[in-house]
Image (cartoon, grey):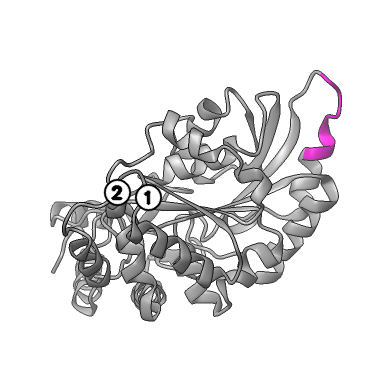
Amino acid sequence: MQKTAFASDNTSGICPEALESFIAANTSNVASYGNDEWTRRACDAIRDLFQTDCDVFFVFNGTAANSLALASLVQSYHSIVCHKLSHVETDECGGPEFFSNGTKLLLAEGEDGKLDVDGIARLVAARTDIHYPKPRAVTITQSTEVGTVYALEEVKAIGAACREMGLAFHMDGARFANAVAHLGVSPAELTWKAGVDVLSFGGTKMGMPVGEAVVFFNHQLAQDFAYRCKQAGQLASKMRFLAAPWVGMLQNNAWLTRAGHANAMATRLSDALAALPGVSLMFPTQANAVFVNLPAHVAQALKDKGWAFYSFIGAGGARFVCSWSTTLEDVDALVADVKSGL
């Protein structure tokens, strides 16, 4: 069994479809800085996936994708509404504030790690005087930091509220594939058709070696974004190696199949753990992450046996994340060790 299988979907290797394209791109000399055929193919594949003419940029990691995308929506005297457990608040070392030259994050409550329209409206209306940073954008995490998924109607409601309040709408989609697999809706329905202006589309957690896509559905907001990427050290000279894995993953819906597998493994693990005495789910398991309350001695016993998992992510408890490479044997071995520790 893989004792690191549940620490994060970042611990998995490269998905075969992504690796095949990555290797295929490693032939001959091609143009640099994104002026190559692989980057063109990847951008076109993403436009086909979302069924619209969007602007696509590739960066190295999720912090850069979120931070630079949000910086493109605001000025330094603006503010951004997010959930208090969102990744941009808890795990990006102030990146969104840094790259936007100080834009303030306004933190909202919300059940199951999700923003709702009322919470957004309360923050936006709380202060309207010139002494307070003006709300300018909303960002949601799909799927959330606690493993839940915004339903399509929830995204639509937030999109409509953003339009009514004059706010830009960003989606942190580090695990967007898992959300789509859970909901069974099209990527277009869950993004621009629901009012999303820009998406940070996660590639690494999906099974790529490195790289995320920043997808602008609002062309106006994408103006000069390439300069932001360059200034932030996110313009890859050998861009084809960031772009090529997307070609492989988006062919034949491999991205969705792999995400569906990760979700299924999480469901199997969640069901098995929830059935054990003394173990309780903290949140519904809707994507590829399982949050449970474990007795302290059981958590320690797992660590003593070499299992890697986090206990400070989201709202605490024990977090187990499944990936494209998680196996039935991994799940069953973990459950067996939890049982033996009870």
Residue 150 lies left or right of residue 251; in this view the side is: right
User: Which quadrant is the N terminus positioned in?
Assistant: bottom left
Name which residue lies at 65% across and 51% down.
219
Q: Is residue 18 above or below residue 243?
A: below
Check disc 2 and report its element: helix, strand or loop.
Answer: loop
Q: CB under 8 Å between callouts 1 and 2?
A: yes
In this view, the residue in front, 186 or 36, is 36
> How far across and how far down the image is residue 208, in percent?
29, 60
In this view, the residue in front, 187 or 308, is 187
Q: Mark 1 — residue? A: 35
Q: Which range of residues does the magenta coloring cover?
A: 124-130
Q: Give the amino acid at mark 2.
A: Ala
In this view, the residue in front, 223 or 125, is 223
Residue 284 lies left or right of residue 251; in this view the side is: right
Q: Mark 2 — residue? A: 31
Q: Give the amino acid at mark 1.
A: Asn
Would residue 13 be seen by someone viewing this image from the given angle?
no
Name which residue lies at 66% across and 57% down.
196
